[in-house]
Amino acid sequence: MYGKDVEKMDIIVKDLCKSYENQKVLDHFSCRFQEGKMTCIMGKSGIGKTTLLAVLMGLVKADEGAVTGMEHKKISAIFQENRLFENLDAVTNIRITTGKSDAEIERFLQKMELKDIIGKPVSEYSGGMKRRVAIARALLAEYDILIMDEPLQGLDAETKEKVATVIKTQTAGKTVLFVTHDEKEAEFFEAECMELV
């Protein structure tokens, strides 16, 4: 009985297939993502990493195959694009999605070294600042599963290290699926690694 319960909690991908205009992106792909662990998904560009995440989130329908373990789960995501409201400030962007109080959001933005931008519209932020707001929004949401697609892209080395530390602390014990090209990032997060080929 215990074994069956554990299996239900893991995310199991079985024989997933997805093509775009006769171009096969996922070809009978199968894997298991462990609950409560961070799994790093690696592989060359165009191999299907982002498509896999989109299928898991229900944003794209697979041609064949099945995914179990995502049912009734709350998902938070960091996409490759920041997807922020440019005319609103960081606090409002995050509050709309998470429902957290302004005080709590402001405290978290200070951890991300963003206190100087509070009150300014997102359109005035640098690319790295926008990225950190998008990360903060995902981390402050209520979730069972966090999905991150190249979350640290566009950040300089020093900022990347600080933000990665915040992500690691915030996601301890959570189920996290994480796409990156950078093996050092996977090592830093002590993630299980899985390569799409």
Image (cartoon, rainbow, N blue to C red):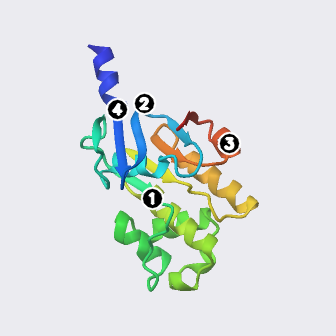
Mark 2 vs 1, N-terminal side: 2
Residue at the spot of label 1: 138
Mark 3 nearby-residue class (10 Å; few <14, some 14–19, many ≥20): few
Mark 4 nearby-residue class (10 Å; few <14, some 14–19, many ≥20): some
Spatial CA span between label 2 and label 1? 25 Å
Mark 4 vs 1, N-terminal side: 4
Residue at the spot of label 4: 15
Mark 3 vs 2, N-terminal side: 2
Q: In the depicted view, which residue is nearer to us: 153 or 119?
A: 153
Residue 155, horizontal then vertical, whole percent = 67, 64
Mark 1 vs 3, N-terminal side: 1
Spatial CA span between label 4 and label 3? 26 Å
Residue at the spot of label 3: 183
The amino acid type, in three-letter code, at marker 1 is: Ala
Instruction: Identify the image quadrant of residue 110.
Output: bottom right
Task: Name the quarter where the C terminus is drawn.
Answer: top right
Mark 4 vs 3, N-terminal side: 4
Spatial CA span between label 4 and label 2? 9 Å
Residue at the spot of label 2: 31
Q: In the depicted view, which residue is nearer to us: 194 or 102?
A: 194
**Are circles 4 and 2 on residues that touch, CB within 8 Å?**
no
